[in-house]
Image: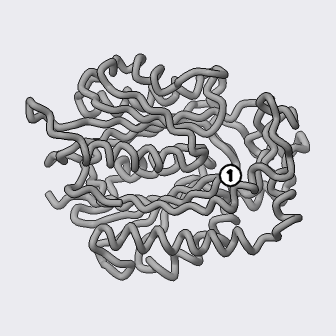
């Protein structure tokens, strides 16, 4: 999926709380095996404490809007994505984020696509901006994408609710503009997404449909549902689909941007924020075959997996580090339950 003209990334931001959850404490309490802690490769991950997930998104968004010198009343569309509980049972966190930002004329949209939510929201807003009729005043169209997640106990154990992933709390925000302006930090060239709905069972397992949240267990337990899936299907369907999906989104994103994996303009690849062993076994070997000349950036050692926010956090870190160099490009990855895989191709405009 590519816009007919590049959509500008005005700027991107990542809000992280000061609190930290320590792997050593999870091991000491018996929640996490020492071998699993080594495989994850995180000494600690951010813990938001009392900060609600939508407020984390607002904090990230305010930083982005302030950096751009813009206010909420200039936004045309706002998409908020999340993975886990936002603080109320039946409620729209996207509208809350819009209200807190005074974005009262923007269209708020909620995206609940689990860990791939941020990338899906980027795709939706990119398409919305690319297809919108020009404003009568000829002003640019502005879209904001946010994510916010907090993996709080007792309903979620950030260290032991899943295999190969530790979950960190964060808020992220990316401001998009069409048409792109000369001072936009990056250009969004394309977004490739592919899904394999046959794998939805990995997060459903053998459990019947319940009538209330956490009706089967006191906390979210993706390990239990994945074990049930593996007992029935084995590991091959997922590993094969994962390799195929990564290859597909890389090829598609680059082709839509007029590039291939050997293009010297492709200098950086931002990995999803999964555990070290998961990346080493399931991601890095596949990417090395396709984009071996680019630098692989594993930016999740200090944060863990940020729920719906991995892709947006990757963009924020590229901006903060001044990457890639002008005239060069980067791929940013995301993946989530369902399963859906995403790849964003961004370019640093030559000044």
Foreground of the two, 180 or 12 = 180
Category of crowding for the residue at label 1, using alpha-carbon neighbours closer than 10 angstroms: few (below 14), some (14–19), many (at least 20): many
Image quarter hosting the C terminus = bottom left
Q: Which residue is mark 1?
A: 42
Residue 187, compared with residue 151, is above or below; it is below
Q: What residue lies at 35% left-to-right and 78% top-to-bottom?
A: 260
Q: How many marks?
A: 1
Residue 71 placed where, x, y %? Answer: 27, 23
In the drawing, does residue 333 fall left or right of residue 129? right
Instruction: Determine the image quadrant of residue 68.
Output: top left
In the drawing, does residue 231 fall left or right of residue 114? right
Instruction: Determine the image quadrant of residue 178.
Output: top left
Q: Describe the element under mark 1 as helix, strand or loop.
A: loop
Image quarter hosting the N terminus = bottom left
Residue 240, compared with residue 312, is above or below; it is below
Residue 111 placed where, x, y %? Answer: 51, 38
In the drawing, does residue 218 fall left or right of residue 351? right
Q: What residue lies at 64% left-to-right and 54% top-to-bottom?
A: 338
Q: What residue lies at 70% left-to-right and 53% top-to-bottom?
A: 165
Residue 345, compared with residue 114, is above or below; it is below
Q: Is residue 261 visible?
A: yes
Q: What residue lies at 34% left-to-right and 33% top-to-bottom?
A: 64
Residue 166 placed where, x, y %? Answer: 70, 48
Q: How is the image coloured?
A: one colour
Q: Is residue 15 visible?
A: no
Farthest-out residue, right: 30
């Amino acid at each position: 999926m590519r816009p007919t003209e590049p959509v500008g990334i005005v700027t991107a931001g990542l809000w992280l709380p000061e609190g930290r959850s320590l792997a050593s404490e999870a091991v000491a309490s018996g929640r996490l095996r020492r071998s699993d802690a080594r495989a994850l490769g995180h000494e600690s991950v951010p813990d938001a404490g009392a900060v609600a997930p939508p407020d984390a998104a607002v904090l990230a968004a305010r930083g982005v809007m302030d950096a751009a010198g813009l206010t909420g009343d200039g936004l045309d569309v706002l998409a908020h994505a999340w993975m886990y509980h936002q603080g109320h049972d039946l409620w729209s966190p996207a509208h809350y984020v819009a209200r807190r930002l005074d974005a009262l004329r923007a269209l708020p949209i909620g995206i609940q696509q689990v860990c791939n939510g941020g990338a899906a929201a980027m795709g939706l807003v990119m398409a919305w901006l690319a297809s919108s009729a020009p404003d009568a005043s000829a002003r640019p169209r502005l879209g904001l994408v946010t994510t916010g997640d907090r993996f709080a106990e007792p309903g979620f154990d950030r260290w032991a609710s899943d295999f190969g992933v530790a979950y960190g709390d964060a808020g992220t925000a990316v401001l998009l503009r069409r048409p792109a302006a000369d001072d936009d930090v990056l250009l969004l060239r394309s977004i490739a997404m592919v899904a394999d709905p046959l794998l939805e069972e990995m997060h459903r397992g053998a459990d019947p449909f319940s009538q209330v949240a956490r009706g089967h267990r006191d906390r979210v337990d993706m390990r239990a549902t994945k074990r049930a899936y593996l007992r029935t299907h084995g590991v091959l369907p997922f590993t094969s689909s994962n390799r195929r999906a990564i290859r597909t989104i890389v090829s598609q994103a680059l082709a839509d941007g007029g590039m291939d994996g050997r293009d010297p303009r492709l200098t950086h690849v931002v990995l999803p924020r999964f555990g070290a062993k998961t990346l080493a076994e399931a991601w890095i070997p596949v990417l090395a075959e396709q984009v071996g000349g680019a630098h692989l950036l594993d930016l999740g050692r200090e944060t863990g997996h940020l729920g719906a926010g991995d892709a947006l956090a990757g963009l924020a870190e590229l901006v903060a580090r001044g990457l890639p160099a002008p005239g060069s490009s980067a791929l940013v990855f995301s993946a989530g339950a369902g399963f859906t895989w995403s790849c964003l191709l961004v370019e640093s405009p030559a000044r």
